Image (cartoon, helix red, strand yellow):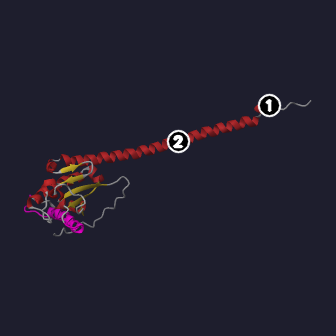
Amino acid sequence: LKREGKHEGESPFWISFSDLMSALMVLFLVVMAVTLVAVTQSIDVATRATIERSAAISRVMAMIANDPKSSGVGVDQQNFRIDLGKEVRFDSGSYTISVPAGQFLRSYIPVLLRAKDTEEGKRWMRNVVVEGFTDEDGTYLYNLQLSLDLSRSLVCSLFQSTSVSDGLDAEQLRKVQELFLVGGYSFNSIKKDKAESRRVEFKVDFWGLDAKRPEVSDVLKGKEFGKC
């Protein structure tokens, strides 16, 4: 007698194929779950690092803003800028620092140096850029040079003193040499009043998360300060 063939639904081939598809589906879900967890953890680490950096920078700027010496200047904690305000003013076409202004600067700079010496400052504070600004009188290039002279004159005043108690000590001057840079803005950032436009600001620059930091160099060690 001839046996009847099995129904297609009862064929072992189809049963094995369906099991294989189910196994592949489970494997795919496991791989996707592991990948999703890894990506999520990576994002969390990056986000946490960003938050920690922002919090550290905020503490550095708050320390500067809350110092009693900062009462006469404007500290913009969001944009990391310090406007010296009426403490340091210049006559039109001049970059001469007055004696009282020089004395104020030499008494104020330690505030920035102390912020740099904190744990957060050592890790994130890159440098302080001294930025000069002029009014709109004169040509662009003339004021560009003048704004640079304003910045340079301010840094020069830090290395001058009329008495021992008035000046910065040698260690502080070394830190100024390593930390401070100068820049000029011509009349690209004028204010309503010309006297307010002729000013100098400090821009505190911080390291980025992925910034490549240079190796420690001895190039400035023992370097003479010179004179302006």
**121, 191: nearer the viewer:** 191
Q: Which residue is mark 2?
A: 34
**Number of numbered discs visible in the structure rendering:** 2
**222, 111: nearer the viewer:** 111
Mark sitting earlier along the chain (1/2): 1
Measuring from the top left, give residue 70's x and y in whole percent: 16, 49
Secondary structure, magenta segment, majority class: helix
Specify the amino acid type for callout 2. Val
CA–CA distance in space, label 1 to label 2: 41 Å
Q: Residues within 10 Å of mark 1 (few under 14, many from 20)?
A: few
**Residue 35 seen in the current view:** yes
Is 21 situated above or below 189?
A: above
Q: Quadrant of residue 184?
A: bottom left
Q: Residues within 10 Å of mark 2 (few under 14, many from 20)?
A: few
Query: In the picture, which quadrant includes the C terminus?
Result: bottom left
156 part of magenta stretch: yes
Between marks 1 and 2 in the image, the one whose residue lies nearer the viewer = 1
Q: Which residue is mark 1?
A: 7
Residue at image position (36%, 47%) is 50
From which residue to which does the magenta span run? Answer: 138-165
